[in-house]
Image (spheres, helix red, strand yellow):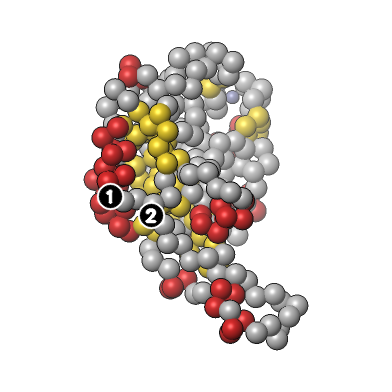
Amino acid sequence: MQFFRMQSPEYSSDSQDLSINGNLEYVYRFPGVSCNACKATYGGSRILAFEAPPQIRNDQRFRSRWPISEEEHAAMQQEVAAYLDTDFAAFETFRPGDNFQPAYYDSPSIPHTDFLWPNIRSFVVSARMKQMVFDELAGDVEIVPVSPRKIGKRNGSTSPSAPDSVNPENHIHGPATIEPYYQILVRAVSDYPKGGAPISVCPVCRHEAIDDEKRELVMREEMWRGQPIFLLRTTLYVVVTEALAEKIQTSGATNVDFVPV
Ligand SMILES: [Zn+2]
C-alpha cells in the first residue's frame, strides 16, 4: 500500500509563498511547561477546535508561550475546563502550547487556490474542497472556519495621499470580500514510526521522550490504523492514502502536492 505526504508546493520565494497562502495567526493559547518531574521544557503547537472562552481573552497568561511550572499549568487547564464546562484530565484534555480559536487570516492578496498553507500546524481549504472531500472525513479531521482579518496590501500610514485608487492591489479589502475558507485539523494518527516509540512517558505532564536519531520517518503499512488521512505520529506530516490523494487530484485541487512517504 502506498501513502503520500500532502504538502504545499515549492515556491520561488517567501513573498510568493505569502502572497498565495497568507498567514494564519492564533492569539490565545496555553503556555509551554517546564516540568519538575521529568525536567523537560516544551510546548507543542496543536490547534483546538473551540474558541477561547471569554474569561481568558484579557488574561496575559493565555497570550504567552513562556514556560511555567507543571502545577501552574495544570491549574490553568482546570480553569479553562471549568469555563468550558468540559470533562478534564490533566495534560490530556489540554497540552502545553495548545492554541484556541479563532484563527485570524491575513493575506496581501485575495486567496483563490483550493488549498492554503498559512501555518505549519494546519492547512486551509476552499468551500468547494471542503464539500467535495473533507466533509466526509469528519472524525478523522475537524473543520473550523478561518476568520479573515487583513486582506489586501496595507495602505502606508506615512503617505495618506497615495493614489491607491489607480492600483486596486493596494486597497484594503474587508473580510466580506473573500470566499469562506476552512482549517482542516487532522486528528487521526498512525502508530509510532520505527524507532519512534517513546523511551519514557512522564507520569505528571505526559511528555514522551523520543530518541530522534533512531526514528525513521517512513510510513509503513503496519503503522496504519485504517484512516484515509492522519498524522505520521511524532511529526506534523499529513499523510493520505493513495485513494484519497487521487480523489483530491482528480477534483482539480490547486496549490497542493503529494510526495510518497
Ligand atoms: Zn513531565
Is label 1 in a helix, a strand or a loop?
loop
Closer to the camera in the image, 91 or 208: 208
The x and y percentages for residue 33 are 62, 34
- Eyeballing the image, is 23 above or below 88? below
Secondary structure, mark 2, is loop
Q: Residues within 10 Å of mark 2 (few under 14, many from 20)?
A: some
Amino acid found under the numbered disc labelled 2: Asp
Q: Name the residue carrying label 1.
A: 251
In this orientation, which residue lies closer to the viewer: 157 or 205? Answer: 157
Residue in the image at 54% along x and 78% along y = 168
Residue that extends furthest to the right in the rendered view of this protein: 158
Is there a contact, CB below 8 Å, between mark 1 and mark 2? Answer: yes
Give coordinates of residue 178: x percent, y percent.
43, 68
Which quadrant is the N terminus positioned in?
top left
Identified at 58% across, 49% down, the residue is 12
Q: Quadrant of residue 43?
A: top right
Q: Is mark 1 within 8 Å of ligand 1?
A: no
Q: Is residue 214 above or below residue 91?
A: above
The reply to whether residue 78 is in sight is: no
Three-letter code, disc 1? Ser
Residue 170: quarter of image: bottom right
Number of disc labels? 2
Question: How many neighbours does mark 1 have within 10 angstroms: few (below 14), some (14-19), or many (20 or more)?
Answer: few
Image location (x, y in percent) of residue 70: 61, 32
View extreme (front): residue:
12
- Rendered residue at 50%/18% (across/down): 216
Question: Gap between marks 1 and 2, in whole Å?
Answer: 10 Å
Position of 134 relative to 90 (above/below): below
Give the residue at mark 2.
Answer: 114
User: Which quarter is ligand 1 in?
Assistant: top right
